[in-house]
Amino acid sequence: MASQWEYNTATRYLLAGRWDWEEPQLKQMAVYEALDAVGREGWELVSAVSLNENGTTNEVQYLFKRPLR
């Protein structure tokens, strides 16, 4: 029987030379702190994709999954 998953995303963006999270609960956290925080909620990182503009990374989108609750 196939497992059922739920998915979530988190976005980190560069604005005025400073990286921050779009999600209010992750604001001002370092990447490792944010990944630890969502991991404690049962989320597993599946993928991270950087978005670039003019050769500069200005956004990173993280995709997470966890068993459906």
Image: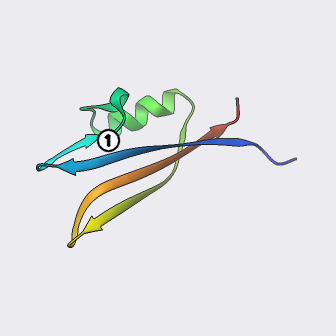
Is 26 positioned to the left or the right of 68 in the image? left
Residue in view at x 11 percent, y 49 percent: 16
Q: Which residue is mark 1?
A: 31
The residue furthest bottom is: 54
Quadrant where the C terminus is found in the figure: top right
Residue 57, position in %: x, y?
25, 62
Residue 5, position in %: x, y?
69, 42
Q: Residues within 10 Å of mark 1 (few under 14, many from 20)?
A: some
Give the residue type that dot 1 points to: Val
Residue 18, position in %: x, y?
15, 45
From the viewer's perspective, is residue 30 above or below residue 58?
Answer: above
Residue in view at x 32 percent, y 41 percent: 31
- Color scheme of the displayed model: rainbow
| Callout 1: SS | helix
The quarter of the picture where residue 54 lies is bottom left
The quarter of the picture where residue 20 lies is top left
Is 50 positioned to the left or the right of 62 in the image? left
The residue furthest right is: 1
Residue closer to the observer: 58 or 48: 58
From the viewer's perspective, is residue 5 above or below residue 48?
Answer: above
